[in-house]
Amino acid sequence: MKILGIGNALLDIFWFSDEESALCLGLHPNSSIHISPERLDELLIAVSTPIHVSGGSAANALKAASALGATCRFIGCTGTEDREHDKAAKLFRSDLDLANVSNFTESRNGPTGRCLIVHMPGELKAIACAPGVAPTLRADQLDTVFFNEIDCVLLDGQTLRNEAVTARIVALCREKNITLALDVASTEIARTHCEIIYSIILNSGSIVFMNSDEAKTFTIAILKKHPEIAEKLSISSSESRQNAKTIVDTLFSSLTSTAKPLPCIVEKMGDQGARAWAAGNKCHASTTPILFPIDDTAAGDTFAGAWLCSFGQGMALEEALDFSNRVAATALSVPGSRLDKDAFIALKNELEYKQHIRSF
């Protein structure tokens, strides 16, 4: 399995504090905000013993896929300082190297994207993200050579903000008959870019990942823009808001009713497991909740990487859901995508064994 990931290159910076440190930093517990790189520098002065891990949804998923045996490449943008890679860029690149993910990031004159995640007692968390140069990907950066002999392109939903880049990726995937996997990435993307997501589902050999909030937001947005779809599916506007889980199921079942395995839509439901729709089939797989998770930052991305390595290589829908749920659970015991190597060795062996059995 060969996967090309495209998206925001972010260095995740974790701080596990024994007090409500976010308040001292001016951050509200259980909040997530965007700030300037300069403001993040000010916050980091107060952060003791930070833990650095390469991040961004595409990079996180690629690290999991690589640990499961896939060959992975990443395209993104990192920053410079005095014409050299800045400290965050060096840490990001080094972490991808350790995960055996080939790095094709381009340098930009500005700071590398960083995300500060502060954990406090009582399972409280505050996030402050300074994207820096991460969103500055250009269409001409996507040389066709990167798409040669690739099975799947994994696109960070944040990239949908860049219409030229998105159009080129979609066109190259169609031209070369490559599966396009999209992680929607946020409720804002699900709402403001619902039309391109809808188009990707309908017109591409695609896999689309959403969490439950994103799935609900996308469904409401599409039904609002296309009342004819709601009429066809016998959905009223009031129902779309009152019974989100059922309405999401109705829409996704319709969008994946083709006999072909793609498009496939996957809803990541956290401690409730996950649902998936493909080839006119749908299923749900529960998961065992982790009582005392260390961090959930990369769990959904880790799920996506596992899904591409299981369903993408022929595993049945329900079996792929169960496997991906178990892989995602391992990410709850580590900060971000700093994966448990021993756990992934066992998971990789399991995946290879099941692939071997299917080959007979």
Image (cartoon, grey):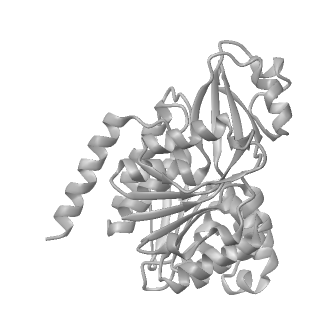
Q: Position of residue 66 (x, y in %)?
A: 40, 51
Q: Which quarter of the rendering shows the N terminus?
A: bottom left
Q: Position of residue 269 (x, y in %)?
A: 56, 51
Relative to 65, residue 182 above or below: below
Which residue is at the front of the view, 125 or 308?
308
Q: Position of residue 188 (x, y in %)?
A: 77, 58
Relative to 225, residue 338 above or below: above
Q: Which quarter of the rendering shows the C terminus?
A: bottom left
Corner quadrant of residue 135: bottom right
- Tally the marks: 0
Q: Is residue 297 visible?
A: no
Q: What residue is rendered at 73% in x and 80% in y?
A: 230
Relative to 303, residue 143 above or below: below
- State the residue lying farthest toward the top: 18
Side of 33 where 64 appears, left or right: left
- State the residue lying farthest toward the front: 83
Side of 332 where 66 appears, left or right: left
Corner quadrant of residue 196: bottom right
Q: What residue is rendered at 48% in x and 35% in y?
A: 338
Q: What residue is rendered at 56% in x and 81% in y?
A: 204
Q: Position of residue 339 (x, y in %)?
A: 44, 37
Q: Is residue 343 visible?
A: yes
Side of 142 where 115 appears, left or right: right
Corner quadrant of residue 98: top left
Q: What residue is rendered at 63% in x and 37% in y?
A: 12
